[in-house]
Image (cartoon, rainbow, N blue to C red):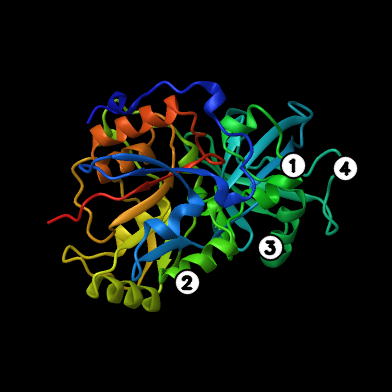
């Protein structure tokens, strides 16, 4: 499909720069394609009333790493000394080595040394220094740090910044509040450079009310990569390459979700990350199995969903793979009507914004 079919105009004031408080007070547009009314305005705290006893939510328990590092490039010669560098860590390949997206990538070469945590802001273990081992395409570099394992984790946590999306970072710097705001209550396993943002709407009180309603909550892990920040540059979806992301569905979770389906309950994923992982792990026959590995699944209109019955997600960027996934799930026309309604009625967009609950009719 043409990528420009997924474009739309969003007034800048619709971009949320901070989340609402409490988290479950965010607005939520309920979308039921083919029903009347198709669109219903609600709030996330209404979720228990909108789900049925026996339904199950699937949440992503990845934890965001403070993966944006600011540093200074150093070379043995005086040429180019003191060049400022920003590196976005996005995939760990060894205890001391990360793949990163670097800016300005053109100013880096294999053998360069980068001192991170500049302006005297170094960790207690000493400065966080790395060597550029390799240089790839699109600003990607391989960084080998002087520290390794847990010591490297501690240093990154000390000097790194929460990797706020570009549409927020361009308007304000990250701060200590973001370290709490940009993690979900489910966050357990470090590895993401972006939050699974639909999970940001949940509170312990909301989970308790869902449990009282008879709605189960099950966890999966998908580490969100830096590819989520990259625009679709191709003119046609067939020419876009997805960045692979690591995920895991445990045998216990697969068994529990299969049981939910067997007794007639609905499986509702919280976010596009959980959606992509569950669909990667599901068979064509609609059974879920334990799964562990990397997925680069790209879901666009025409895709036949294998397992999920509903999805809670935020409002996504124009021309993004995420808005394409939403269009695939509820239909492109329904997606466009929902987004038009949300813009006209003051919904807040993107990572810190409001939610939509997608409940299409069961597929034959």
Say above or below: 290 vs 347: below
Residue 152: x and y in percent read: 70, 60
User: How far is the residue under mark 3 from the one under mark 2?
Assistant: 45 Å
Point 59% across, 50% down: residue: 23
Q: Residues within 10 Å of mark 3 (few under 14, many from 20)?
A: some
Of badges 3 and 4, the one in the foreground is 4
Q: Are marks 3 and 2 in contact (CB under 8 Å)?
A: no
Task: Give the left or right position of residue 32, taking residue 14 as reference.
Answer: left
User: How far is the residue under mark 2 from the one under mark 1?
Assistant: 36 Å
- Camera-side residue of 300 and 356: 356
Residue assigned mark 1: 175
Viewport quadrant of the C terminus: bottom left
Q: Are marks 2 and 1 in contact (CB under 8 Å)?
A: no
Residue assigned mark 4: 120
Of badges 3 and 1, the one in the foreground is 1
Regarding mark 2 in the picture, which secondary structure is present there?
A: helix
User: How far is the residue under mark 4 from the one under mark 1?
Assistant: 18 Å
Residue assigned mark 2: 212
Residue 80: x and y in percent read: 73, 26
- In the picture, the disc for residue 148 is 3
């Amino acid at each position: 499909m043409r990528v420009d079919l997924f474009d739309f105009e969003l007034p800048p004031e619709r971009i949320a720069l901070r989340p609402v408080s409490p988290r479950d007070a965010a607005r939520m547009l309920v979308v039921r394609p083919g029903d009347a009314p198709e669109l219903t305005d609600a709030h996330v705290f209404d979720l228990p009333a909108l789900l049925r006893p026996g339904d199950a939510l699937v949440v992503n328990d990845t934890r965001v790493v403070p993966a944006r590092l600011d540093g200074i490039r150093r070379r043995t010669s005086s040429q180019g000394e003191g060049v400022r560098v920003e590196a976005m860590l996005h995939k760990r390949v060894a205890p001391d080595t990360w793949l990163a997206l670097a800016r300005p990538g053109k100013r880096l070469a294999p053998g360069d040394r980068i001192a991170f945590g500049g302006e005297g802001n170094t960790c207690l273990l000493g400065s966080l220094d790395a060597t550029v081992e390799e240089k790839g395409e699109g600003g990607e570099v391989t960084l080998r740090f002087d520290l390794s394992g847990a010591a490297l984790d501690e240093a990154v946590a000390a000097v790194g910044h929460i990797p706020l999306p570009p549409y927020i970072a361009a308007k304000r710097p990250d701060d200590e509040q973001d370290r709490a705001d940009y993690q979900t209550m489910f966050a357990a396993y470090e590895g993401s450079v972006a939050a699974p943002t639909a999970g940001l709407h949940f509170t312990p009180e909301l989970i308790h009310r869902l449990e009282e309603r008879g709605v189960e909550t099950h966890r999966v892990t998908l580490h969100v990569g830096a590819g989520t920040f990259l625009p679709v540059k191709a003119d046609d979806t067939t020419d876009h390459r997805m960045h692979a992301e690591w995920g895991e569905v445990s045998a216990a979770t697969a068994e529990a979700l299969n049981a939910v389906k067997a007794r007639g309950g609905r499986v509702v994923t919280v976010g596009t990350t959980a959606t992509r992982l569950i669909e990667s792990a599901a068979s064509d026959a609609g059974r879920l199995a334990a799964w562990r590995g990397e997925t680069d699944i790209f879901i666009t209109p025409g895709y036949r969903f294998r397992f999920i019955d509903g999805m809670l997600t935020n409002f996504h960027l124009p021309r993004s793979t995420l808005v394409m996934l939403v269009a695939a799930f509820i239909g492109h026309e329904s997606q466009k009507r929902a987004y038009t309604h949300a813009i006209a009625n003051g919904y807040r967009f993107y990572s810190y914004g409001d939610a939509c609950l997608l409940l299409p009719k069961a597929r034959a």
